[in-house]
Image (cartoon, grey):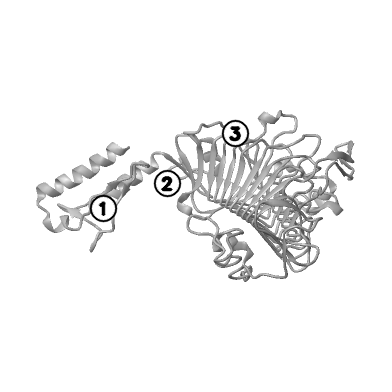
Amino acid sequence: MKSKFMIIVFLIFFVMIVSGCEDNRQNIIPPIINEENDSIETEEPKGDTNIEVDGIDVTTEIEEKEKEIVFENSIFVCPNGNGTGTYDNPYSLENGIQNLTNDKTLYLLSGTYNVSSVIRLTLNGSLDSYYKIYAYKDEKVILDFGKDYSKEQALTGNYNSEKAKGIVIKGTYYHIKGIIIKNCGAQGLQISGSYNIVENCVFANNGNTGCGIGGASNKAYNEWPHDNLIKNCTSYGNYDWDRLDDMQGEDADGFGCKLTTGPNNVFDGCIAYNNSDDGWDLFTKHLTGPIGSVTIKNSIAFSNGFSLTGESMKNGNGFKLGGRAIEVSHLVENCIAFYNKANGFDDNSNPGTITLKKCTSYLNGTRNYAMGRFLEENNTYSATWYEGDILFGPVDNVPKSHNVFVDCISYSSAITDSYCGTANNSYFFNQNNKYVVFDALSVCNSKYSKGNEIDSYDPFVSTNINLDDLENIHYEYRNNDYSINLNNFLKLKNNFNIGASF
């Protein structure tokens, strides 16, 4: 590919030299070959940007050659496509998926694709050969699944959630980028394969979790999905109807990595808000046992447990990090939880080592940090519950919580934090309605008086954020590279070297 570009460039300059085109030559700046991706980069020339040599429009010719090279490695689809997969004559989405190979990129042209069945991706790629499905040039691409069931159907059981999902990735080494997935009857996107990347996607108004990772309970742990990356994605307004009346909304999280997931799944730069249950859910249960460790970083969760119009829904935790007193270690770094109905960060009875680094929790409805379920040794988890037809609980001999807090900050007006483990340079809100500060690495336990108490503090540059347009958070609060930008909201003042930074 590089040699082809070099030949084109050489011929153009050769023609110019032998033609003695002094006037045109002075406007040309030699191109730079980018060694990483074989592309041509040029500085912006002064004056007329179209260059002619002996009556030939050289600029147009270069653009056409570049287009040919890009297009020969691409498949194109559009909402009403019925062609052969070229840019000018695109496939339908269905035909594009069927013809996808790992030596070509499948580009979705802009528009709304009305999808009536599950898209199942089952092929297996490799580290140097991903199956790529991209929105073309950041155009707005919407997959609308039409949510083809009613609340009444869900409650009467006349509903098959497996057939109501959006995209299911069962294969390996897929890279999906820039797509909006909405109005699915169940999960918007489910990943049951490994080594996949989902980037700059939006999951909205689906009938269960927006984007979830999870495998089959009858598979061995080493077959559960692992090493997946969810990057710079947004999930909001998801709400599940397929439960009994008093359970509605209890399963639809923004992002899920629970029950049957292997190690090294990562969420980076993601936003979860106004989902009926939690922002993130890393739940575990006894029938399937511990899941693999999960990393969540550079992400925010807000207003979960409330609908987009403000109605109270179900649990409403920002980051729910466990379940049923099963030990699993997780890492949460540079994350913010605010305005959630329940807890900002919740261990949910996970006594494992949960490490929170540079996290900010602000004005959540119950606790900013509910990270100390077990404050003593040899605890009893007193709950009883069914998993299928099997009754579980109580659970005895649960170890003391041993979380790790580094550079974390809590800002509350009334609700006491719960925390247990070790803390370094962190602020919590205690039972005396004061802030307790742990300056140096030390044992922390919200049951006992430790740390230095202060009455109040003023750490933020601004506590104002405009949330009037909830349908466009993904576009309003991200940079050009789709990393999160909250402007000055909850930005720490210069004298506070703690908390999350965006």
Could you tell me if residue 147 is visible in this image?
Answer: no
Could you tell me if residue 28 is visible in this image?
Answer: yes
In the shown orientation, is residue 135 left or right of residue 274? Answer: left
Residues at marks 3 and 1, CA–CA distance in whole angstroms: 42 Å
Q: Which residue is mark 1?
A: 59
- The amino acid at mark 1 is Thr
Picture quadrant where residue 362 is located? bottom right
Residue in the picture at 15% in, 44% down = 14
**Which dot marks residue 171?**
3
In the shown orientation, is residue 168 left or right of residue 348? Answer: left
Residues at marks 2 and 3, CA–CA distance in whole angstroms: 27 Å
Residues tagged 1 and 2 counted as in contact (Cβ below 8 A): no
> Which quarter of the rendering shows the C terminus?
bottom right
**Callout 3: few (<14), some (14-19), or many (20+) C-alpha neighbours within 10 Å?**
many
Residue mark closest to the camera, 2 vs 3: 3
Q: Which residue is mark 2?
A: 87
